[in-house]
Image: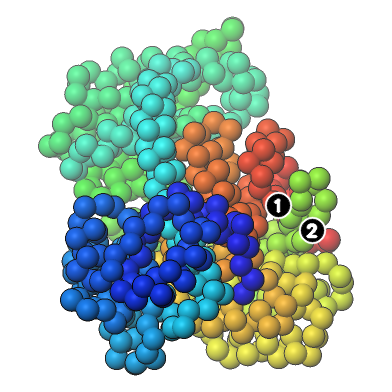
Amino acid sequence: MSIDLKELSVMCQSLSLLYVEDNADARKSTLSLLNNFFKDITIAVDGQDALDKFSNKKFDLILSDINMPNLNGIEMLEHIRKDDKNIPIIMLSAYSDSEYFMQAIKLNVDGYILKPLASNQLYEALHKVVQKITLLLINKNYQNHLEKEVKKRDKLIEQKLHYDTLTQLYSRYSFFKDIEKLNSPTIVLIDINKFRIINEVYGSDIGSEVLEKFALYLSSSVEDASCHIYRLSSDEFAILSTKNIINSKNYVILVEKLFHRLNNLKLEIDNNTIVIDVTIGLSSVQKNSYESAKIAMEFAKKNKKPYVMYSKEIDDRKESGLTLECRDTISLAIDESRVVPVYQPIVDKDSNIVKYETLMRLKEKDNTKLMSPYYFLDVAIKTRLYDSLSSIIIFKALHVASTTDNVFSINFTYSDIKNSSFIQKIENFLIEHIKVGKQLVFEITENESIESYEEVKSFILRFRKYGVKIAIDDFGTGFSNFEYILEVEPDYLKIDGSLVKDIDTNTRSFTLVEAIVQFSHKLGIKVIAEFVHSKVIFDMLKELDVDEYQGYYFSEPKIEI
């Protein structure tokens, strides 16, 4: 491993080192190397001396001999680990004794070097440890900065988010905030039927006036002071009581009255008489109350009922029906060869295409439309059809790669990785098509479903020997194992699209993306941003020095390259 000594020196300059060595000659020799990197070195001549100095000063790193008088390195380390379980420690020993080595491992040392000390061994150990320290420091700094920024922005955003600008009712944001405060909220959802047609016939200006007048009429129809009224989306409204204990029977009575007042409501606007019809869903359950009310409303619409109160029977019928229908759709698509890959370009800073990500779609029966995995992937996983879908897409992508010079990025889940027979088939393909490996990037989504990181690392090593590059997908939100990133040493990190899509309006997202780019580049990892949907976002990401870009601003996924 080649170490950039100038870079290592820069990384070490601000770190404090505790160096423990009883042998004066060894101490002098090692210090001649360490002084090239560290400005702050504290010397201890044995384990007890080191403990005394450790208790009086905070250090970033410890480099210690093992065999010393008074207190040896292992005993010293046992004391230190009681106070600080995380400080990086590199141990030195003149003996390749397996017992010492095992004791050091149990005490979580970060490096173990045999004497006589070779400079390149020291540099490699320091480089690994300092990378870890730098990464943790970056992580801590951007978290602290983020907390301050979020607090400032939250105060401003809170003021703007509580009310709907058109109707002056409480907003969707307020609705979900208020639900969190209640143990068993009772929710009434009201939907204006066929509002889209009103917009198309009369225009959006009159459509907006319809919503304003409807909101006023709805407000005057709800007399209970404990009830708040919200506009959730274009034509969806909600009523929620601020009380925790609600008599659902009373709410049913309220719903009946509301329906009779709101249905067939005639609004006079610009010499037009516009008739409003509504559908109402009611829910009074402890968990997922909004989703339950939504299910009740959809059930009412489908069955042409004016209003429906949620029950588990409605949910079960809906869920099982949708799952079976979707499963049949997937199975038929597999049988009829309607599972197809589409390709979305990934570009550089000059918008030149550098590779394509391979994505999965199902062709509908008439072959005119493509169905996104959003609509079928969960069902495919539940009904064990996912492996078949994944195999089809991956092998189609491999065959396309073997006939072109383009580079293709292919997604692998942990389910794919642990499917040994499937992985063997892929390796056999790369053996037969030896040049294809260098045209591939395998994207791995790192999340809590990974049961064995060793299995993932083994997969990576297995395919790297064919020239395949590795990308970690959806990085930056939720589950992010930084130690894993250091061990795997991916070629790319793909920033989670949820951070990229609102980077121009969300300080939190901007700060996270900035930090990810910085620490990735320090580790020699390239950064790809997906969900780039505008020039503004593209320009901001270029300013942050993102390496590659993907999104609808450049191109939607297409069947043909």
User: Judging from the image, what secondary structure is the residue with disc 1 in?
Assistant: strand
State how the image is colored: rainbow
Q: Position of residue 36 (x, y in %)?
A: 53, 59
Q: What kind of residue is marked 1?
A: Glu
Nearest the camera: 403 or 307? Answer: 403
Quadrant in the rendering for residue 368: bottom right
* Quadrant of the rendering where the N terminus is positioned: bottom right
Nearest the camera: 290 or 365? Answer: 290
- Contact (Cβ within 8 Å) of mark 2 with mark 1: yes
Q: Earlier in the sequence, mark 2 or mark 1?
A: 2
Taking 303 as reference, is 327 left or right?
A: right
Image: 177 above or below 31: above
> What residue appears at the point 20 percent right and 29 percent down from the top-left corner?
242
Q: What kind of residue is marked 2?
A: Val
The residue labelled by disc 2 is 354
The residue labelled by disc 1 is 548
Taking 370 as reference, is 88 left or right?
A: left
Decide: few, some or many residues near mark 1? Use Cα within 10 Å; few <14, some 14-19, many ≥20: many
> Across the whole image, how many numbered discs are drawn on residues?
2
> What residue appears at the point 80 percent right and 74 percent down from the top-left corner?
401
Can residue 398 be seen at all in this image of the molecule?
Answer: no
Image: 500 above or below 401: above
Nearest the camera: 43 or 405? Answer: 43
Numbered circle sitting on residue 249: none
> What residue appears at the point 26 percent right and 52 percent down from the top-left corner?
57
